[in-house]
Amino acid sequence: MQAEIPLACPEYDEAEAEALLAVLRSRRWSVGPALRQFEDGMAALAGRAHGVGVSSGTMALQIALEALGIGPGDEVIVPAYTFVGPVNAILGAGAHPVLVDVDPVTLNIDPDSVDAVVGPNTRAIMPVHLFGRPAPMPALQVIAEGHRLRVVDDACEAAGARDESGPVGRHGDIACFAFYPNKPVSVGEGGMLVMDDPDLVLRARQLRNQGNDPLSGTAIVDRPGHSARLSEWHAALGMVQLKRLEASMARRERVAALYRERLQDDERFELPAPAAANQRIAWFTWPLRLAPRLADRRDGLIRALRAEGIGCNTYFTPVHHLPFHRGRHRHGALTVTENVGRRCLAVPLHSAMGEDEVDRVCGLLRELVECAS
Protein backbone atom coordinates (compact mmCIF):
# COMPACT_ATOMS: atom_id res chain seq x y z
CA MET A 1 0.00 0.00 0.00
CA GLN A 2 1.16 3.54 -0.72
CA ALA A 3 1.91 5.95 2.10
CA GLU A 4 -1.08 7.28 4.01
CA ILE A 5 -2.33 10.79 3.34
CA PRO A 6 -3.58 12.15 6.67
CA LEU A 7 -6.63 14.36 6.95
CA ALA A 8 -4.53 16.90 8.84
CA CYS A 9 -0.78 17.32 9.24
CA PRO A 10 0.63 20.21 11.28
CA GLU A 11 3.87 21.65 9.98
CA TYR A 12 6.99 22.37 12.00
CA ASP A 13 10.74 22.83 11.66
CA GLU A 14 13.66 23.66 13.89
CA ALA A 15 12.07 26.97 14.87
CA GLU A 16 9.46 25.13 16.94
CA ALA A 17 12.13 22.99 18.57
CA GLU A 18 14.16 26.06 19.48
CA ALA A 19 11.09 27.80 20.91
CA LEU A 20 10.28 24.81 23.11
CA LEU A 21 13.87 24.54 24.29
CA ALA A 22 13.85 28.23 25.24
CA VAL A 23 10.77 27.67 27.42
CA LEU A 24 12.36 24.59 28.99
CA ARG A 25 15.48 26.51 29.91
CA SER A 26 13.51 29.49 31.20
CA ARG A 27 11.81 27.37 33.89
CA ARG A 28 8.79 29.62 33.37
CA TRP A 29 6.31 27.11 32.03
CA SER A 30 2.98 28.82 32.78
CA VAL A 31 1.60 32.38 32.48
CA GLY A 32 4.87 33.90 31.34
CA PRO A 33 6.30 36.01 28.52
CA ALA A 34 5.56 33.52 25.74
CA LEU A 35 1.86 33.57 26.57
CA ARG A 36 1.74 37.36 26.63
CA GLN A 37 3.51 37.53 23.28
CA PHE A 38 1.16 34.99 21.71
CA GLU A 39 -1.88 36.76 23.12
CA ASP A 40 -0.70 40.02 21.57
CA GLY A 41 0.04 38.27 18.27
CA MET A 42 -3.40 36.67 17.98
CA ALA A 43 -5.11 39.90 18.97
CA ALA A 44 -3.21 41.74 16.24
CA LEU A 45 -4.10 39.05 13.68
CA ALA A 46 -7.79 39.62 14.43
CA GLY A 47 -7.57 43.40 14.63
CA ARG A 48 -8.27 43.40 18.37
CA ALA A 49 -6.69 45.06 21.37
CA HIS A 50 -6.34 42.08 23.73
CA GLY A 51 -5.98 38.31 23.80
CA VAL A 52 -6.50 35.75 26.58
CA GLY A 53 -5.01 32.30 26.05
CA VAL A 54 -6.85 29.26 27.39
CA SER A 55 -6.71 25.48 27.21
CA SER A 56 -8.97 24.86 24.18
CA GLY A 57 -11.23 26.53 21.67
CA THR A 58 -14.30 25.12 23.39
CA MET A 59 -13.15 26.53 26.74
CA ALA A 60 -12.54 29.88 25.04
CA LEU A 61 -16.16 29.93 23.87
CA GLN A 62 -17.46 28.94 27.30
CA ILE A 63 -15.38 31.56 29.09
CA ALA A 64 -16.52 34.15 26.54
CA LEU A 65 -20.16 33.45 27.41
CA GLU A 66 -19.44 33.48 31.13
CA ALA A 67 -17.48 36.73 30.84
CA LEU A 68 -20.56 38.28 29.21
CA GLY A 69 -22.77 37.10 32.05
CA ILE A 70 -24.63 34.49 29.98
CA GLY A 71 -25.75 31.41 31.89
CA PRO A 72 -28.76 29.51 33.28
CA GLY A 73 -32.06 30.48 31.68
CA ASP A 74 -30.39 32.21 28.72
CA GLU A 75 -30.50 31.03 25.10
CA VAL A 76 -27.67 31.23 22.58
CA ILE A 77 -28.31 30.80 18.85
CA VAL A 78 -25.81 28.54 17.08
CA PRO A 79 -25.76 26.65 13.76
CA ALA A 80 -26.86 23.01 13.80
CA TYR A 81 -24.30 22.14 11.13
CA THR A 82 -21.02 22.59 12.97
CA PHE A 83 -18.51 20.85 15.15
CA VAL A 84 -20.19 20.12 18.48
CA GLY A 85 -17.71 22.29 20.45
CA PRO A 86 -19.73 25.54 20.43
CA VAL A 87 -22.88 23.72 21.55
CA ASN A 88 -20.96 22.04 24.38
CA ALA A 89 -19.56 25.45 25.37
CA ILE A 90 -23.07 26.89 25.62
CA LEU A 91 -24.14 23.97 27.80
CA GLY A 92 -20.97 24.32 29.88
CA ALA A 93 -21.91 27.92 30.64
CA GLY A 94 -25.32 26.71 31.83
CA ALA A 95 -27.21 28.25 28.91
CA HIS A 96 -29.46 26.65 26.28
CA PRO A 97 -28.41 26.30 22.62
CA VAL A 98 -30.98 27.11 19.93
CA LEU A 99 -30.05 25.43 16.65
CA VAL A 100 -30.53 27.15 13.30
CA ASP A 101 -29.95 26.33 9.65
CA VAL A 102 -27.04 27.17 7.36
CA ASP A 103 -26.68 28.68 3.92
CA PRO A 104 -26.73 26.01 1.17
CA VAL A 105 -23.70 27.48 -0.63
CA THR A 106 -21.35 28.63 2.13
CA LEU A 107 -22.57 26.22 4.86
CA ASN A 108 -22.28 29.12 7.30
CA ILE A 109 -25.05 30.23 9.65
CA ASP A 110 -28.09 31.66 7.82
CA PRO A 111 -29.05 35.13 9.15
CA ASP A 112 -32.73 34.66 8.22
CA SER A 113 -32.83 31.48 10.30
CA VAL A 114 -31.31 33.40 13.21
CA ASP A 115 -33.90 36.16 13.05
CA ALA A 116 -36.72 33.60 12.98
CA VAL A 117 -35.87 31.98 16.34
CA VAL A 118 -35.05 34.98 18.52
CA GLY A 119 -37.20 34.69 21.64
CA PRO A 120 -37.62 36.35 25.02
CA ASN A 121 -34.75 34.38 26.56
CA THR A 122 -32.30 34.83 23.69
CA ARG A 123 -29.13 36.56 24.88
CA ALA A 124 -26.49 35.86 22.24
CA ILE A 125 -25.59 34.61 18.78
CA MET A 126 -22.62 32.30 18.28
CA PRO A 127 -21.78 32.21 14.54
CA VAL A 128 -19.17 29.72 13.33
CA HIS A 129 -16.75 30.43 10.44
CA LEU A 130 -17.18 26.89 9.18
CA PHE A 131 -14.23 25.28 7.40
CA GLY A 132 -12.35 28.58 7.67
CA ARG A 133 -14.86 30.49 5.51
CA PRO A 134 -15.91 33.91 6.85
CA ALA A 135 -19.47 33.93 8.20
CA PRO A 136 -21.90 36.77 7.30
CA MET A 137 -20.96 38.93 10.28
CA PRO A 138 -22.38 42.30 9.08
CA ALA A 139 -25.86 40.80 8.68
CA LEU A 140 -25.61 39.06 12.05
CA GLN A 141 -24.48 42.28 13.72
CA VAL A 142 -27.61 44.01 12.44
CA ILE A 143 -29.77 41.27 13.96
CA ALA A 144 -27.83 41.39 17.21
CA GLU A 145 -28.18 45.15 17.51
CA GLY A 146 -31.87 45.03 16.67
CA HIS A 147 -32.57 42.50 19.43
CA ARG A 148 -29.87 43.70 21.86
CA LEU A 149 -27.98 40.42 21.67
CA ARG A 150 -24.35 39.68 22.40
CA VAL A 151 -22.16 38.09 19.72
CA VAL A 152 -19.53 35.47 20.54
CA ASP A 153 -17.69 34.82 17.30
CA ASP A 154 -16.50 31.22 16.86
CA ALA A 155 -13.44 31.74 14.68
CA CYS A 156 -11.82 28.53 15.91
CA GLU A 157 -11.35 27.20 12.37
CA ALA A 158 -10.52 30.50 10.71
CA ALA A 159 -7.28 32.11 11.91
CA GLY A 160 -6.01 34.24 9.03
CA ALA A 161 -9.31 34.36 7.13
CA ARG A 162 -10.64 37.72 5.94
CA ASP A 163 -13.80 39.26 4.54
CA GLU A 164 -14.51 42.61 2.93
CA SER A 165 -14.33 44.41 6.28
CA GLY A 166 -11.07 42.91 7.52
CA PRO A 167 -9.76 39.91 9.44
CA VAL A 168 -12.04 37.26 10.89
CA GLY A 169 -12.26 37.80 14.64
CA ARG A 170 -12.73 41.56 14.58
CA HIS A 171 -16.53 41.34 14.95
CA GLY A 172 -18.66 40.66 17.99
CA ASP A 173 -18.12 41.23 21.68
CA ILE A 174 -15.53 38.44 21.82
CA ALA A 175 -14.05 36.18 19.15
CA CYS A 176 -12.42 32.82 19.83
CA PHE A 177 -9.73 30.78 18.08
CA ALA A 178 -8.48 27.22 18.52
CA PHE A 179 -5.10 25.58 17.93
CA TYR A 180 -5.85 21.85 17.51
CA PRO A 181 -3.49 20.08 15.04
CA ASN A 182 -5.86 20.57 12.08
CA LYS A 183 -6.16 24.33 12.55
CA PRO A 184 -4.32 27.04 10.55
CA VAL A 185 -2.31 27.90 13.68
CA SER A 186 -1.56 24.58 15.36
CA VAL A 187 0.06 24.03 18.74
CA GLY A 188 -1.59 20.71 19.66
CA GLU A 189 -4.18 22.03 22.10
CA GLY A 190 -5.30 25.48 23.14
CA GLY A 191 -7.60 28.39 22.45
CA MET A 192 -7.67 32.19 22.52
CA LEU A 193 -10.24 34.88 23.24
CA VAL A 194 -9.71 38.23 21.52
CA MET A 195 -11.61 41.41 22.39
CA ASP A 196 -11.36 45.16 22.92
CA ASP A 197 -13.18 45.75 26.22
CA PRO A 198 -10.66 45.78 29.10
CA ASP A 199 -13.36 44.75 31.59
CA LEU A 200 -14.05 41.60 29.58
CA VAL A 201 -10.32 40.91 29.38
CA LEU A 202 -10.00 41.02 33.16
CA ARG A 203 -13.04 38.78 33.63
CA ALA A 204 -11.74 36.24 31.10
CA ARG A 205 -8.36 36.15 32.85
CA GLN A 206 -10.08 35.58 36.16
CA LEU A 207 -12.26 32.82 34.77
CA ARG A 208 -9.32 30.92 33.25
CA ASN A 209 -7.46 30.89 36.57
CA GLN A 210 -9.89 29.54 39.20
CA GLY A 211 -11.59 32.93 39.45
CA ASN A 212 -8.46 34.90 40.34
CA ASP A 213 -6.27 37.04 38.11
CA PRO A 214 -2.71 37.05 39.47
CA LEU A 215 -1.71 39.95 37.23
CA SER A 216 -4.18 42.34 38.87
CA GLY A 217 -4.78 40.55 42.16
CA THR A 218 -8.55 40.62 41.58
CA ALA A 219 -11.20 37.90 41.82
CA ILE A 220 -14.75 37.32 40.60
CA VAL A 221 -17.54 36.67 43.09
CA ASP A 222 -20.50 35.51 40.96
CA ARG A 223 -19.05 32.41 39.28
CA PRO A 224 -16.49 29.70 39.97
CA GLY A 225 -13.51 29.83 37.67
CA HIS A 226 -11.70 27.16 35.68
CA SER A 227 -8.22 25.73 35.48
CA ALA A 228 -7.84 26.65 31.82
CA ARG A 229 -4.54 28.43 31.28
CA LEU A 230 -2.61 28.06 28.03
CA SER A 231 0.90 26.86 28.82
CA GLU A 232 4.12 28.61 27.85
CA TRP A 233 4.94 25.57 25.69
CA HIS A 234 1.83 25.99 23.57
CA ALA A 235 2.22 29.76 23.39
CA ALA A 236 5.83 29.47 22.21
CA LEU A 237 4.77 27.12 19.43
CA GLY A 238 1.95 29.49 18.56
CA MET A 239 4.25 32.44 17.93
CA VAL A 240 6.34 30.38 15.51
CA GLN A 241 3.19 29.21 13.75
CA LEU A 242 1.90 32.77 13.49
CA LYS A 243 5.09 33.87 11.74
CA ARG A 244 4.59 31.27 9.01
CA LEU A 245 0.80 31.56 8.76
CA GLU A 246 0.79 33.57 5.53
CA ALA A 247 3.04 31.08 3.73
CA SER A 248 1.10 28.13 5.12
CA MET A 249 -2.22 29.60 3.98
CA ALA A 250 -0.85 30.13 0.49
CA ARG A 251 0.18 26.48 0.25
CA ARG A 252 -3.24 25.36 1.48
CA GLU A 253 -4.93 27.60 -1.08
CA ARG A 254 -2.86 25.91 -3.77
CA VAL A 255 -4.06 22.48 -2.64
CA ALA A 256 -7.67 23.68 -2.63
CA ALA A 257 -7.21 25.01 -6.17
CA LEU A 258 -5.78 21.67 -7.32
CA TYR A 259 -8.77 19.81 -5.93
CA ARG A 260 -11.09 22.16 -7.77
CA GLU A 261 -9.21 21.72 -11.07
CA ARG A 262 -9.35 17.94 -10.79
CA LEU A 263 -13.01 17.55 -9.77
CA GLN A 264 -14.90 20.55 -11.14
CA ASP A 265 -16.25 18.66 -14.18
CA ASP A 266 -17.40 15.58 -12.26
CA GLU A 267 -21.14 15.94 -11.63
CA ARG A 268 -21.02 13.30 -8.89
CA PHE A 269 -19.40 15.83 -6.56
CA GLU A 270 -20.53 19.24 -5.34
CA LEU A 271 -17.42 21.24 -4.53
CA PRO A 272 -17.04 23.86 -1.80
CA ALA A 273 -17.72 27.34 -3.11
CA PRO A 274 -14.62 29.38 -3.96
CA ALA A 275 -13.83 32.45 -1.91
CA ALA A 276 -16.09 35.39 -2.64
CA ALA A 277 -14.75 38.75 -3.77
CA ASN A 278 -12.62 40.43 -1.08
CA GLN A 279 -12.69 37.22 0.96
CA ARG A 280 -9.98 34.80 2.04
CA ILE A 281 -10.71 31.28 3.32
CA ALA A 282 -8.39 29.72 5.89
CA TRP A 283 -8.59 26.22 4.38
CA PHE A 284 -7.88 23.47 6.90
CA THR A 285 -9.76 20.64 5.21
CA TRP A 286 -11.62 20.27 1.93
CA PRO A 287 -15.35 19.53 2.37
CA LEU A 288 -17.24 18.26 -0.64
CA ARG A 289 -20.73 16.86 -1.06
CA LEU A 290 -21.85 13.84 -2.99
CA ALA A 291 -24.60 14.35 -5.55
CA PRO A 292 -28.04 13.69 -3.99
CA ARG A 293 -28.42 10.35 -5.79
CA LEU A 294 -25.22 9.13 -4.11
CA ALA A 295 -26.00 10.29 -0.58
CA ASP A 296 -26.48 6.76 0.73
CA ARG A 297 -22.93 5.90 -0.40
CA ARG A 298 -21.21 8.59 1.67
CA ASP A 299 -20.35 6.43 4.69
CA GLY A 300 -19.23 3.54 2.50
CA LEU A 301 -17.02 5.88 0.51
CA ILE A 302 -15.39 7.11 3.70
CA ARG A 303 -14.66 3.53 4.76
CA ALA A 304 -13.25 2.70 1.32
CA LEU A 305 -10.99 5.77 1.27
CA ARG A 306 -9.68 5.02 4.75
CA ALA A 307 -8.90 1.46 3.64
CA GLU A 308 -6.70 3.01 0.94
CA GLY A 309 -4.87 5.17 3.47
CA ILE A 310 -6.76 8.39 2.75
CA GLY A 311 -7.77 10.34 5.84
CA CYS A 312 -11.39 11.49 5.66
CA ASN A 313 -14.38 12.14 7.86
CA THR A 314 -18.03 13.20 7.73
CA TYR A 315 -17.38 16.82 8.84
CA PHE A 316 -19.95 17.15 10.41
CA THR A 317 -22.76 15.12 11.87
CA PRO A 318 -25.50 17.70 12.55
CA VAL A 319 -25.55 18.45 16.26
CA HIS A 320 -29.16 17.35 16.78
CA HIS A 321 -28.28 13.89 15.43
CA LEU A 322 -25.50 13.29 17.97
CA PRO A 323 -26.57 10.80 20.68
CA PHE A 324 -26.45 13.13 23.67
CA HIS A 325 -28.07 16.07 21.88
CA ARG A 326 -31.04 14.33 20.24
CA GLY A 327 -34.27 15.97 21.26
CA ARG A 328 -32.63 18.27 23.82
CA HIS A 329 -32.48 21.64 22.05
CA ARG A 330 -34.95 24.13 20.62
CA HIS A 331 -34.39 24.65 16.92
CA GLY A 332 -35.81 26.23 13.82
CA ALA A 333 -36.25 24.61 10.41
CA LEU A 334 -33.08 22.69 9.52
CA THR A 335 -33.72 21.81 5.88
CA VAL A 336 -30.25 22.57 4.56
CA THR A 337 -28.54 21.01 7.57
CA GLU A 338 -30.43 17.75 7.07
CA ASN A 339 -29.56 17.68 3.38
CA VAL A 340 -25.89 18.53 3.75
CA GLY A 341 -25.44 16.29 6.77
CA ARG A 342 -26.22 13.23 4.64
CA ARG A 343 -23.87 14.09 1.79
CA CYS A 344 -20.79 15.92 3.08
CA LEU A 345 -17.35 14.47 3.66
CA ALA A 346 -13.94 16.07 4.07
CA VAL A 347 -10.73 14.88 2.43
CA PRO A 348 -7.12 15.80 3.26
CA LEU A 349 -5.89 19.35 2.90
CA HIS A 350 -2.73 20.54 4.57
CA SER A 351 0.28 22.61 3.66
CA ALA A 352 2.58 19.64 3.03
CA MET A 353 0.37 18.10 0.32
CA GLY A 354 1.78 17.94 -3.18
CA GLU A 355 0.14 17.59 -6.57
CA ASP A 356 0.71 13.84 -6.67
CA GLU A 357 -1.16 13.38 -3.40
CA VAL A 358 -4.09 15.48 -4.62
CA ASP A 359 -4.18 13.39 -7.78
CA ARG A 360 -4.24 10.20 -5.74
CA VAL A 361 -7.12 11.40 -3.56
CA CYS A 362 -9.13 12.57 -6.57
CA GLY A 363 -8.47 9.34 -8.47
CA LEU A 364 -9.70 7.25 -5.57
CA LEU A 365 -12.76 9.47 -5.11
CA ARG A 366 -13.75 8.88 -8.72
CA GLU A 367 -12.97 5.18 -8.60
CA LEU A 368 -14.67 4.33 -5.32
CA VAL A 369 -17.77 6.53 -5.26
CA GLU A 370 -19.84 4.35 -7.58
CA CYS A 371 -19.01 1.06 -5.84
CA ALA A 372 -19.12 2.27 -2.22
CA SER A 373 -21.94 0.87 -0.12
Image (cartoon, grey):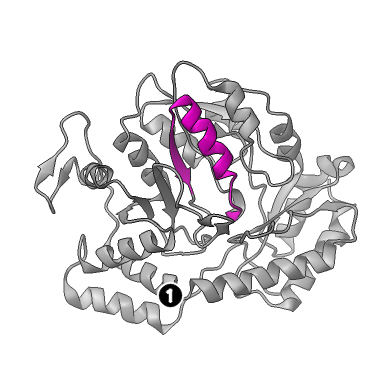
> Residue 361, percent across and down?
76, 66
Is 3 located above or below residue 371 in the figure?
below
Is 303 located above or below residue 324 in the figure?
below
Which stretch did the figure color magenta? Answer: 132-154
Element type where label 1 sits in the image: helix
Q: Is residue 150 magenta?
A: yes
Q: Quadrant of residue 318?
A: top right
The residue at the point 50 percent across, 54 percent down is 168
Q: Quadrant of residue 113?
A: top right
Task: Tell which residue pokes out farthest to the bottom in this image.
Answer: 14
Left or right: 354 with respect to 238? right
The residue at the point 46 percent across, 58 percent down is 180
On the question of residue 26 being in view, the answer is: yes
> Residue 25, percent across and down?
20, 78
On the question of residue 331 being in view, the answer is: no
Q: Which residue is mark 1?
A: 243
The residue at the point 73 percent across, 54 percent down is 272
Q: Is residue 53 magenta?
A: no
> Residue 158, percent across and down?
53, 56
Left or right: 369 with respect to 315? right
